[in-house]
Image: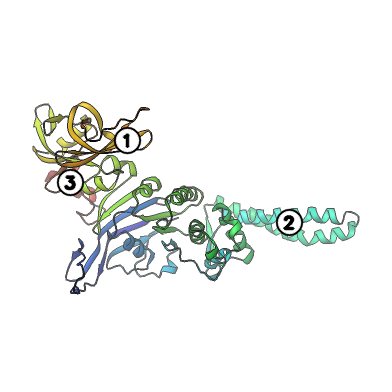
Amino acid sequence: MADVKIRNLVKIYPYIDKKPKKGEKVKKTNLQITDKGVVAVQKFNLDIKHGEFVVLVGPSGCGKSTTLRMIAGLEDISEGDLYIDGKLMNAVEPKDRDIAMVFQSYALYPHMTVFQNMAYPLRILPQHITYKFEIRYLNNKLEKIAHIEEELKEKYSNKPEKLQKKLEKYELVKKEAEARITECNGLIDKGEESYFKKMSKDMIDFKVREIAEMLNISEYLDRKPKNLSGGQRQRVAIGRAIVRNPKVLLMDEPLSNLDAKLRNQMRAEIIKIRQRIQTTFIYVTHDQIEAMTLGDRIVVMKDGYIQQVGTPQEVFDHPRNLFVSGFIGIPQMNYFDAKLLKKEDGYYVDINGYVVKPSKEKQERLKKSKVEEQDILVGVRPDHMSITDKGITGRVNVTELMGTTSHIHATVNNKDIIAIVPNDGVHVDYINKDVTFGFNGNVIHMFSKENERNLEFLSEVLASEFRFDDDLAKKQAEHEKK
């Protein structure tokens, strides 16, 4: 595994100003158009640690796949630098970056069997062979020899001389294997991990079957891709990537072609794979469920810019702007027009007469950001709303029974909202009734109407505001003074 450092990465495509044909709809884009062309990725800065699982998430066209392809070497880098394990990779060929990639379309060779598809990258290029893997391979070899010796002893039990000659063939192989295991353990004790060499045919066979067993596709090794289901093909594609033991594993929306049930199964499989292999993962998806369940950290993108980087829980609990708050979370966050009031004992939020006092932690962050009274947007997640006597009243339009809970769709102050309420064993039909919804001050999110930033974190430097360097902390302090 390796660390990945991305510094001010920019991707610019040539701009072609096409006049629409008669009757053709003009596609709108929010990407910046400059003299150089269309900027698809803007000043992308990220540090990915050894063995970390980072997920790039965002809507279609936000630049996440383009960023992944630049890391892979499939797209040229217009500006900025890419480092893998401390080495500058901008001009390095994809085959020399020690990375592997799983594509959305599987990209399997149709004329090859599953075994051949997985073994192909091991046959054509030298590989980083870890000493731990070689020890497993040699132990497996010794187990096979022991099994053969038992069969020979049973077969030639009445012919000791012939048995001795047969067994002598394997003595030298056993001694060599045992000596090599001892040597590998010694190298591991010294801190060495691997060596670079082309694998033998037997070693390739062992490696492919080991990975196939881990992915539960051992029984399909002799089949061709056309005889596999979508989920099985995806496992083969993942197996072909991880069989090389790459330093960085890139995955570009690998589950988007699967149905909902298979996606759930494959998400669990990827989590298991991550636990068993030591590599750095960079995963691209537009599905926020995948991002929240798989990633150590998630990078939310929009229009080529990073909107927020953080752990899934951090991004969910503390979205830095309006876009992130609406993109992360199912169902989407509800929004209300409100007034932020500043009094002697702290801040208050007035939502059409319903006054809520933010929690102590929120009060402290608002004070730190020196927030003044203003008109704001207040966000509340559907599962943080409840039916109460005091709150915001709205007319219910639809009630969706979801088993233990109900999703109540209502109109409040001319805005559509959703509340998730428990059924407590009894389903209540609220359709066409006026219902009052309430919530606590610790679950509200306050956004500026001017720039859509979360008012609690105005003092923070956004990922896109400054160029990345080692003096970012100093710039953060200067920004806070302003």
Looking at the picture, tell me which residue is in the foreground, 161 or 208: 208
Left or right, 319 with reference to 449: right
Residue 236, percent across and down? 51, 60
Please tell me how crowded label 2 is: few (under 14), some (14-19), or many (20+) other residues with Cα within 10 Å: some
Q: Is residue 35 above or below residue 412?
A: below
Local packing at callout 1 (Cα closer than 10 Å; few below 14, some 14-19, many 20+) is: some
Disc on the earlier residue, 1 or 2: 2
Distance CA(mark 1)–CA(mark 2): 62 Å
Q: Is residue 131 visible?
A: no
Q: Which residue is mark 2?
A: 145
- State if disc 2 and disc 1 touch (CB < 8 Å): no
Q: Residue 453: which disc?
A: 3
Kind of residue sitting beneath label 2: Ile
Q: Which residue is mark 1?
A: 406
Disc 3 vs disc 2: Cβ atoms closer than 8 Å?
Answer: no
First in sequence: mark 3 or mark 2? 2
- Choose top left, top right, bottom left or bottom right for residue 100: bottom left
Of circles 3 and 2, which is in front? Answer: 3
